[in-house]
Amino acid sequence: MKRIFILFLLTVFIIPAYTANIKKLSSEAQISLITCSSGDELYSIFGHSAIRVVDDSMHINEVYNYGTFDFHTPNFYGKFANGELDYMLSAYNFKYFLPSYFRDNRSVSEQMLNLTKAEKQRLFDALEVNRQPENKFYRYDFFFDNCATRIRDIIFNSLDGEILYTKSDTLDMTFRDMIHLYLNKQPWIREGIDVLLGSKIDAKITQYESMFLPDYLKDYFVNTEVKRDSTTQPLILSDTDLLKFEDSEIASSVSPEQYGWMLFILLLLLHLYEIRTKKRFLIIDRLLLLTTGLLGVIVFYLWTFSELTATGANYNILWAIPTNLILLFKLKQLNRKGFFRTLGIITWVSLLIVLLVWKFLPQQLPPAAFPLSLIIFIRLRRLVFTKEISK
């Protein structure tokens, strides 16, 4: 009952107090979607979106930016890994927005929104309420609640008419396919992300959901119309380049998958030499099990304890097995009866299964992990099923 009473007070007194202090836009006010191209840093690879409000008669030229966060947040990286990091809406004069993108050679475009006076005021009111200290923070989710989806929702909620999309609402792509479009020039980052993100991002995506990426939000708006009464009009009035830079070309290099197969061939030759000479270089097996075991612990932690929606149901756990950290200390006992031999057999069978069904799993696994899993499978077989003396 007490909570209901507090909610009543907020609704009746607090929120109206905010809106009463919000400026009324003039008939010349313009609101636009700002889209920024990809940057070199990981947090900027996928671009950025913001909203700009300009009303010269009211001396307003503000940018509303849902993509800001505080690096000085206590336990910043821990909160990020646990999905507990809050982002915030920042609002400031537009003259401070462009210089940083100019320094980073990132293109910036502006799409003028075709809104009625009432829709502009409604959108401006919502932004101003959102910027209040008690409202500006939100729990960030890269795929479902980020700088682009927040803008999509607040603009669509401000429209009076019916939203019509002029293209098909289905895409023959998954969330993973879409982020790969931005990571092809940084294959090692792509490979790492593919290890950490689970099967939830391998679902087919709709056009509406694709707007978690700023470029696709921009494209959606270009192809969107609004039907008000009996009149249908485009959502975008104009599209202007505020900053224009050519995309930088990165020279092609050896991919992680190619490195994986080169490592496989090298270790396979070493394995054949070991069989011929009846030797075992256990340091190689320990390094392989240490690497995959540590990855498995990270995958397990993100799946089990993190609030991140995209890290659950991660099939990488079938080859990045946390218990490999136990096996690496007991390699000489894997061919003897007991707990460690049983664990070694379970690990070997798990690798066999994942290698056989690799292409049929409901998740796209990182390509470089296949040759890595294959060589561990081959070497582990000898450790578990032969009685040779380890050296």
Image (spheres, rainbow, N blue to C red):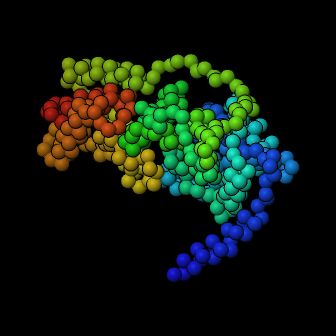
Horizontal and vertical percent position of residue 50? 67, 44
Q: Say if 191 sits above or below 307 in the image.
A: above
Horizontal and vertical percent position of residue 108? 70, 33
Out of 376 and 360, give the one closest to the viewer.
360
Looking at the image, which residue is at 25% across and 33% down?
Answer: 357
From the image, which quarter does the C terminus lie in?
top left
Residue 232 in view: yes
Out of 132 and 306, give the one closest to the viewer.
132
Horizontal and vertical percent position of residue 154? 61, 51
Looking at the image, which residue is at 65% across and 64% down?
Answer: 134
Out of 91 and 381, give the one closest to the viewer.
91
Total labels drawn: 0
Horizontal and vertical percent position of residue 132? 70, 61
Q: In the image, is 27 to the left or to the right of 250? A: right
In the image as oriented, which residue stretches furthest toward the bottom? 1
Q: In the image, is 128 to the left or to the right of 182? A: right
